[in-house]
Image (cartoon, helix red, strand yellow):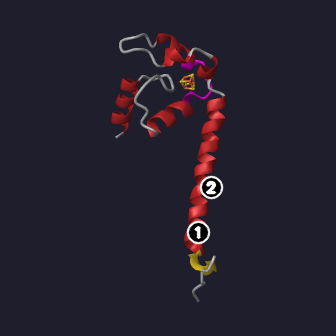
Amino acid sequence: MRLDMTGTEWGRPVDRAAQTDGEFEALAELLDITDEQEWQERALCAQTDPEAFFPEKGGSTREAKRICQGCEVKDDCLEYALAHDERFGIWGGLSERERRKLKKRAV
Ligand code: SF4
């Protein structure tokens, strides 16, 4: 027996299975955003000078990396930067070039 997953809404047919998938995706996206907000609220860099994390070309990254070493959300931060292909700045204690190398090694 096949369950009929269609109905009507505002006079138009609605595929309930597709609607449920869409709602599930929207919820999953919302949970991801909530996760991001959760770790970003605990980011140590939020309490420091943000410019240290986005130095001018050739500028020192030492201070930012030192702060990252003591940050409790370092892994979440690095994971986020890798997943979102962040091109600039220090994330999770790594520079853009270091993240690129890490990504290459993982392939
Ligand atoms: S690891 Fe570094 S860049 Fe990432 S949230 Fe922590 S302090 Fe900020």
Task: Report whether residue 40 is seen.
Answer: yes
Residue behind mark 1 = 19
Residue 101 location, x and y as percent? 35, 29
Residue pushed farthest bottom? 1
Q: Is mark 1 on a helix, strand or loop?
A: helix
Residue 84 location, x and y as percent? 46, 39
Which image quadrant is residue 19 in?
A: bottom right
Q: Is mark 1 within 8 Å of ligand 1?
A: no
Establish if 34 lies above or below 72. below
Disc 2 residue type (three-letter)? Leu
The residue carrying pointer 1 sits among few (fewer than 14), some (14 to 19) or many (20 or more) residues within 10 Å by Cα, namely few
Q: Earlier in the sequence, mark 2 or mark 1?
A: 1
Q: Residue at x 57, y 58 (%)?
A: 25
Q: Ligand 1: give its quadrant.
A: top right
Residue 71, magenta (yes or no): yes
Residue 107 location, x and y as percent? 34, 40
Task: Report whether residue 65 is seen.
Answer: no
Residue behind mark 2 = 27
State the extent of the magenta-drawn residues as a range. 68-75
Establish if 98 lies above or below 15. above
Q: Does the residue labelled 2 lie within 8 Å of ligand 1?
A: no
